[in-house]
Amino acid sequence: MHFHTYTTIIRVLLTVLGFAAISLVGELGQSFLLIIGVVTLVSLAINVKYELSIAPRLWNILAVIMLLGFIINYIAFDHDLLSSGAAFLALMVVLKLYDLRSVRDHLLLYMLVFLEIIIAAASTVSPAFLAILAAFVITSIWAMVLFNIRRDYEQWNGKNKIITQRGLLSPSFFLYTIAITTLSLVMTLMLFFIIPRISSGFLERENKSILSVPGFADELTLGNIGRGKGSSKIVMRIEFPKVSGPPINMYIKGTTLDNYDGRNWRRSKNTKRKIEKNFNGDLIPEVKLKGRLFNQLITLEPLNTNILFAATPWSKISGNFKNLKTDNSGTLYMESKPFSRITYSVWSTMDGREGAELGSAELERYLQLPLPGQEDTGKIKAFTTELIANEKTKYKAVRKIEAHLRRNYRYTLNPKKGAGKTPLSDFLFYAKEGFCEQYATSMVIMLRTIGVPSRIVTGYVQGQWNDIGNYLLLRQRDTHSWVEAYLPYSFSKSSPRTLNNKTERMAWIRFDPTASEGLVTPVKSSRLALYIDALKWRWTRNIVNYTIDDQIETAITLKHRTNGLRKWFTSLLKQLPSLKDKAANSGQSLPLVIALILMSAAFLVVVINRGKARTTIKTPAFYIEMLRILKKKGIEKTAFETPLEFAKRAGGAEVKTLTEALERVRYGMKIPSKSETSQIKSLLEIIKNN
Amino acid sequence: MTTKEAIDKIQTLKTNLGRVIKGKEAVIELAIAALLARGHLLIEDVPGVGKTTLAHSLARSIDASFQRIQFTSDLMPSDIVGVSIFNESKMSFEFKKGPIFANVVLADEINRATPKTQSALLEAMSEEQVSVDNITHRLPSPFIILATQNPLEYAGTFPLPESQLDRFTISTQIGYPTEEVEREIISSKNTRPLHEILSPVVTSEEVAAMQDIALTVKMEEDLLTYIVRICAATREHADIKLGVSPRGAMAFHRAAQAIALINGRDYCTPDDIKRVAVPCLAHRVMQARHVMEDSIKEPALLIEEVVEGIAVPV
């Protein structure tokens, strides 16, 4: 191949890789990417076919225009340096394809591609980036090697002479570099897993794509959650260490709201207090919990709220938090909204019973009702009283209301408008359909009319279990609201008792009045989508957020594995004498068979390659041997010497005779006779002993 | 004729020439190589070192028709190829063959003729034929031109055009004899012209057969690549404006085969190739003109430099 062909290959590869990297920058629009992609490909085709160059002055003008466009775009429209920079770079690469005259122009192109890669590194955590980066590393090694060869060559032989030079490199040049690069990548990966790191991830940056989730602010307008239900944006992923599947009835609590005005829910002001930490630095609640604890490892996407999500009641939270605060609503607050993904571990019993002691002022807050103008509370009260007439305990009454709502109201995300003038009476008496907010709000107001303190809870339920990656995927459409009622609860027994029993403790108990259709998330994502998400997740989990704990875990697993291998091997050695009889029908010898097959395959490869090598090296063995002996004595043949010239320089009749023999065999293609062969052997001996 | 016989015949030819051209075995070998490669020989040197003697001796050693053309500035093309003369008795034009119609043509001091006359040789040299008045006349076979020329700096010379230089397979110099040989030459009592001592030792048929055998000399694949690389490198060299043409490469290949046969082998070695590189290629290249006139290297030096930079296949 021409040297020129190599540089062309490198140029095409780098340009394509640069574009691939840019396409990972999420902020660039699909249509922009499509256009740029097509333009890049067309320009490449033109470049390869015609090597078109535009006038330098025109090029400079265009470049300045693009720079101005970039600045204007950044200041006036985009405001994001990375995405506008990415667009600028992609355009510059295309432009540069029309101005590749000198070596310097090529270097500039490579530089632009490198910047594209850097931008992609700063904007994406996509696993595809790893592949692009690896390919870029290999290709840029090629580019560097070629550049150096060209520079050195031109130093001695004049400008541009190299372009049409053949045979400077063989196609195996690519193979060797790939092998070497793969090797170094593997080594780097190994080091990556072994050496502890100070900080993780690629270049970190302030994440501007913070997901806006409704329902977790201080205020919630009725219908907000329902509107967000269409979105399948991922909000969090939960792993359950040491458990093979997701627990049923997972309610991931976000916040609670207590004040309802007939349209909006609000959280009343109350003082926040710091959550204490134990000696391990883990956060612990004020009330200690008993019972079986479930561990959840939650990874939260960057959301526009500082609320921390957890299954309740929780007994321990560990994570990288400076401070975590809580208030009487039971909500967990971080110090600020997180800018990037956060991962934390929660231990909770998940039974939905939170012990609490409320003062009378607080009790009043949870019994607040909308004003008569805001909601028809009288009618609701009458309806509720009638509904629970036969129930003997408050707990049973609450359960009755929950069951009634669940059974008699249809779940829909697009409820029709009934004849009712206010939202709740319309839902309860006319439309009789709605979604979680209507269900939960109705239940809270119904409970309050009969004197049960209660509040609305927003959070996440259900989700989708990714069995490929073994984690629970919670999306925005899994947002849910339910009810907590303040009821007496005995911790020694598993069922709550009546209000009259003063010895019992009080607790917030979870009720979910929403019809079960509302809890079943329609599974839209295919297996492939699950697989891709699992892959992404593993990437984030094991590469981007790889921690010292993971390193320790990996080391331990490796140790166990190797121990197992060693044991298997020793037992195999012990079995060896009896192996002959077993081999015929034993399934255990499978590893041995596989090992044998692999070994013989490797042997075959070696043998075949050796055969190949013999055909490519035409120099007779005796001459190579002679050169080796002479080299030991300090006389070395250069590549530019003919054998005869070397023989004259080396001196000695033996060398001359051997060289003549070489000429006959090598260039005359004559097969040496037996006497000649023995003569050659003796001559070699003489040279050796001289 | 077998290879062995051919080698013997070449030895005889060599010895025969050696009787006249003393102490110049290398030059004699190159002259024979040009003959065996079906090419033409250009001998370039200062006057009086034996250019004409060598050419004449070679011509005499072959039992074939021989013509000598002394090139001068007023020599016309028709003086070489011949003219059509009106024959009154037959009432038609008749072609009268010129001196070029011979097996061996000695073109003495070729660069003293005008370019027009020099060009008259072009067709004859490459196609072994001449065309006059739209009629093509075959030249006898074997056909070889032995040309001599004075170095370009000498007065009254016209440089040969590149296209013509390219048609000479080998261009060589003779050089001054050594002290010992020169003593022998001047103390010689011989008064006859040197070439008259010589008698033909090969027939023209034998020369044709030897030429055929030279073509069959084995050239190993890698050596062929070696030749191609050397030629390609002359085209890439920074100090060379005009590299070796494919015709030059072909001549180079044949000359290497011929030299191998002269050295008594039926196969080529890298040394054969190196040996004929300068005689075969130096006159075909043009140096690049640099600002520093001092840095201009002689073509022979450039070719040596090129050859020394190509790895020898072993």
Image (spheres, grey):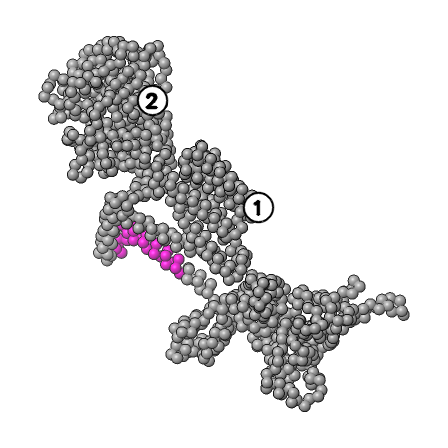
Q: Is residue A15 left or right of residue B235?
A: left
The foreground one among A132 and A532 is A132
Element marked by disc 1: loop
The foreground one among A526 and A325 is A325
Q: From the top left corner, tell me how far across and down residue B197 is, in percent.
A: 69, 85
Residue A28 vs A351, above or below: the answer is below
Label 2 vs 1, first from the N-terminus: 1
Residue A143 vs A655, above or below: the answer is above
Name the chief secondary structure element in magenta.
helix
Q: From the top left corner, tell me how far across and down residue A225 is, in percent.
A: 33, 23
Chain designation of label 2: A
Q: Which residues are magenta?
A: A579-607
Q: Callout 1, which amino acid?
A: Ala
Quarter in which the C terminus of chain A is drawn: bottom left
Residue B306 vs A28, above or below: the answer is below
Q: From the top left corner, tell me how far across and down residue A370 is, in percent.
A: 26, 14
Question: What residue is shown at x 22% (from left), y 13% (from top)?
Answer: A449
Q: Are marks 2 and 1 in contact (CB under 8 Å)?
A: no
Element marked by disc 2: helix
Question: What residue is shown at x 87% (from left), y 69% (from top)?
Answer: B87
Q: Which mark is residue A224?
A: 2
Residue, disc 1 = A55
